[in-house]
Amino acid sequence: MNTTQSLQPQSLQPHALEPVQLTVTRDSIRTYAALTDDFNPLHLDPAFAATTAMGRPIAHGTMSLCLIWQCLLRNFGAQAFQDLEVDVRFVKPVYIDDVLTAGGEAAGDEAGSCSVWVRGPDGTDRIVGTVRRRPPLP
């Protein structure tokens, strides 16, 4: 199989994905803000963030989502990204000093489908969702 071919459905059905981790730091948030040109004060300004419902700066949601991409890359290789549909929900904010873990497992009996998640240090979900292999076009 060459790397331009899509994954076989069974290759998206491991029992559990090998997880990846990230420790969120003030510097990683600043670097991500510069990379994405997203300088929202909720992420960068402690005085501003203190006036919000979050009470303190939070990491960009998409920064946490990147962990799911890293997990998929580690487990399936780059070709996995050719035919994927991703459906996620952000359920809880991520704060400075959180240690995040992304992983997943086979999602029921649906061929080519995995549930995926990002969890905080307390084990609570920060992102939950499903990754599916897109059906081929007719």
Image: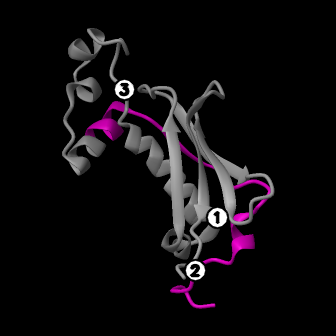
Residue 131 versus residue 122 in the image, above or below: below
Q: Badge 2, how many Cα within 10 Å: few under 14, some, many 20+?
A: some
Q: Does 3 appear in magenta? A: yes
Q: Residue at x 33, y 22 (%)?
A: 57
Instruction: Give yes or no for residue 130 being in the magenta stretch.
Output: no
Q: Disc 1 or disc 2, which is closer to the eye?
A: 2
Mark 3–mark 1 distance (CA, rounded to whole Å):
28 Å
Residue ID at (27%, 16%): 49
Rounded to the nearest whole Å, what is the CA distance between mark 1 and mark 2?
14 Å
How would you rate the neighbour count of disc 1 (Cα within 10 Å): few for under 14, some for 14-19, many for 20 or more?
Answer: some
Which one is in front, 42 or 13? Answer: 13
Q: Tell me whether the residue at label 1 lies in contact with that at label 2, contact meaning CB atoms closer than 8 angstroms.
A: no
Quarter holding the C terminus is bottom right
Residue at 50 percent of width and 26 percent of height: 92
Secondary element at image label 1: helix
Does 54 sit left or right of 106 as displayed?
Answer: left
Looking at the image, residue 59 sits to the left or right of residue 20; the answer is left
Number of numbered discs overlaid on the protein picture: 3
Report the residue marked by disc 2. Answer: 6
Residue 1: x %, y % from top left: 63, 90
Q: Which residue is mark 1?
A: 75
Provide the residue designation for mark 3. 58
Amino acid type of the residue that numbered disc 1 sits on in the rendered structure: Asn
Write down the region rendered in magenta: 1-30
Mark linked to residue 46: none
Q: Quadrant of residue 47?
A: top left
**Local SS, label 3:** loop
Vertical arrangement, residue 12 with respect to residue 60, above or below: below
Front-lying residue, 116 or 112: 112
Residue 14 at x, y = what percent?
A: 76, 61
Name the spot of residue 112 as percent of width and height, x first: 69, 65
Disc 2 to disc 3, how far (Cα)? 36 Å
